Amino acid sequence: MTPPRPHLPIRPLWLCRACAAPWPCATARLTLRHEYTHDRVALLVYLGGQLHDAADDLYRLNPHDGPEPRQLFDRFLGWALIRGAAGDDRTRISP
């Protein structure tokens, strides 16, 4: 039996190699949360680097109609932030 393919990005498209969803896909997010369970700051630093690389690649592929910055933020970092209480727009990073 062939081992499952890891959910890693295909660059410069930033699609998942395993499921073809925009990376980080749901499985990649779960895997990353598990890998960085005890170091949320390292997770955010890693994702920030991936966001930088993805923005560069995606804008180079389509300079006239590239992805919106907010969409890229939500895709790469927004899901990893801990949201505040209901109605609180501030975000906080917890250990």
Image: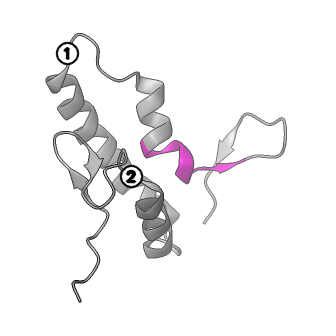
Q: Amino acid at mark 2?
A: Pro
- Of residues 3 and 50, which is closer to you in this image? 3
The residue that mark 1 highlights is 63
Residue at image location 60% in from the left, 66% down from the top: 95
The answer to which of marks 1 and 2 sits earlier in the sequence is: 2
Q: Which residue does the image show at 52% across and 73% down from the upper left?
A: 37
Instruction: Tell me which amino acid carries mark 1.
Output: Pro
Residue 93: name its quadrant. bottom right
Residue positioned 46% across, 29% down in the render: 71
CB contact under 8 Å: marks 1 and 2: no
Q: Is residue 62 magenta?
A: no
Numbered mark located on residue 15 in the image: none
Where in the figure is residue 53, as x and y percent of width and height? 23, 40
- From the viewer's side, name the closer residue of 92 and 25: 25
Range of magenta residues: 76-83
Per the image, label 2 sits on a secondary structure element best described as loop
State whether residue 7 is above or below residue 9.
below
Q: Quadrant of the N terminus?
A: bottom left
Indicate left or right for 37 with 11 as reference. right
Find residue 24 and name its label: 2
